[in-house]
């Protein structure tokens, strides 16, 4: 009681100081941001930064986007910069390419990249080739973006991966984000680039939250196009992937680490231009390589990496043939059990890694 009465008699400031010392201050919780919100944030910042930037596509404005990626942008920027279009990919993609040639910076959203086939002439012949055909006089600063690859239960005409298709074409840059940091940094870099950029997102990743570093929260944050990222260092095998399968590779690496196998997981981030330097440096260290992608095997991203490794300095460092993990070489079935067997799973990656390590 004497101690308490003594405290009461002390000045209030001294008492509050004693009470403060009784508590431990904790660091603020890490900011969790979904891939959807990261893309939205990136577009919002670029729309605010540059009045030449605008977004057009089906349902991107009043409906906030089919996948809510453009949520809130129409209310903020209005009809002139967030534009709903008719269901005519050839038409609105042509409008976007023409606007880019006239000096604007359009973001052209496809509800799915499967529908970009309706506009392939505009993307390749009008956008990708113009800078070369004009002798460098006419740039086409445009971003083509939307969900790409397998989703869930949408069958053959809505599940195709176009990474190899667009990666094949000179004049385009092609990026493929996995997490929220990739998504925000790459969409901002794509919008600022003076070349046509294809950004291949993944529908199943839109709602997945990732920690966003304080650096990535800055309005000046960019992920450079053409630079891969080592997501997990390792010494036994290099595992290269892009988009959603990067997460599967990290899961496989966690499982295998319990067996003493340390995988170096590389998130490609960019399909074209391909960051072969990062891949080759890793292969020279691990002496083994596995590529993982959701697309079809023939003439795919993994096939290109295999060819580059064979033609380059890393080939002599390989202790075993490169192994590819890909989607099945069939149109995507609708039935879930068949769909699961057509898309690379964690068990398939583990099997491939053990195969290349002769285990």
Image (tube, rainbow, N blue to C red):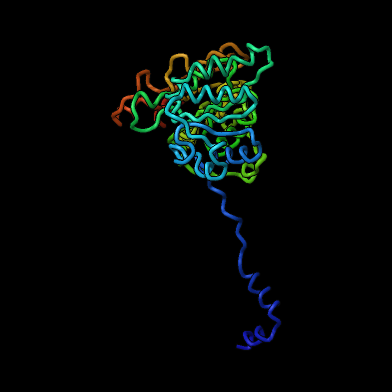
Q: Based on the displayed image, in which of its 4 quarters is residue 272 positioned?
A: top right
Q: Based on the displayed image, in which of its 4 quarters is residue 58 positioned?
A: top left
User: Residue 148, how many percent across, how many down?
Assistant: 45, 28
Left or right: 53 in relation to 34: right
Left or right: 86 in relation to 231: left
Is residue 139 shown to the viewer in this render? yes
User: Residue 355, how many percent across, how many down?
Assistant: 44, 22
Q: Residue at x 45, y 36 (%)?
A: 59
User: Residue 170, how many percent across, how many down?
Assistant: 58, 15
- Closer to us: 45 or 77: 77
Q: Based on the displayed image, in which of its 4 quarters is residue 27 positioned?
A: bottom right
Is residue 281 shown to the viewer in this render? no
User: Residue 48, how many percent across, how many down?
Assistant: 63, 41
Q: Where 298 falls versus 46 (above or below)?
A: above
Number of labelled discs? 0
Q: Where 309 falls versus 224 (above or below)?
A: above
Q: Quadrant of the N terminus?
A: bottom right
Q: Quadrant of the C terminus?
A: top left
Q: Residue at x 61, y 31 (%)?
A: 191
């Amino acid at each position: 009681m004497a101690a308490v009465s003594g405290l009461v008699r002390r000045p209030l400031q001294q008492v509050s100081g004693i009470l403060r010392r009784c508590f431990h201050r904790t660091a603020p919780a890490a900011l969790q941001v979904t891939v959807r919100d990261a893309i939205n944030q990136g577009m919002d910042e670029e729309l605010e930064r540059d009045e030449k930037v605008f977004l057009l596509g089906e349902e991107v404005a009043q409906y906030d986007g089919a996948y809510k990626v453009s949520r809130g942008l129409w209310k903020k920027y209005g009809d002139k910069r967030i534009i709903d279009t008719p269901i005519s990919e050839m038409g609105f993609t042509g409008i976007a390419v023409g606007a880019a040639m006239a000096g604007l910076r359009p973001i052209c959203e496809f509800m799915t990249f499967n529908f970009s086939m309706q506009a392939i002439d505009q993307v390749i012949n009008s956008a990708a080739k113009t800078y070369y055909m004009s002798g460098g006089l006419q740039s086409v600063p445009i971003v083509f973006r939307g969900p790409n690859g397998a989703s869930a239960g949408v069958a053959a005409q809505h599940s195709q991966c176009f990474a190899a298709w667009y990666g094949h074409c000179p004049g385009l840059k092609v990026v493929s984000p996995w997490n929220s940091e990739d998504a925000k940094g790459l969409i901002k870099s794509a919008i600022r680039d003076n070349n046509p950029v294809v950004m291949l997102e993944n529908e199943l990743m839109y709602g997945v939250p990732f920690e966003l570093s304080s650096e990535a929260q800055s309005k000046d944050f960019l992920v450079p196009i053409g630079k891969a990222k080592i997501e997990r260092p390792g010494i036994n095998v290099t595992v290269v992937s892009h988009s959603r399968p990067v997460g599967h590779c990290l899961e496989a690496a966690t499982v295998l680490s319990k067996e003493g196998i340390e995988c170096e997981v590389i998130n490609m981030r960019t399909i074209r231009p391909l960051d072969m330097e990062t891949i080759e440096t890793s292969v020279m260290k691990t002496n083994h390589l596995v590529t993982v992608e959701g697309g079809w095997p023939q003439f795919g991203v993994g096939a290109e990496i295999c060819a580059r490794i064979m033609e380059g300095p890393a080939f002599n460092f390989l202790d075993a043939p490169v192994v590819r993990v890909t989607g099945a070489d069939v149109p995507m079935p609708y039935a879930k059990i068949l769909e699961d067997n057509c898309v690379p799973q964690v068990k398939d990656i583990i099997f491939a890694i053990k195969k290349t390590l002769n285990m």
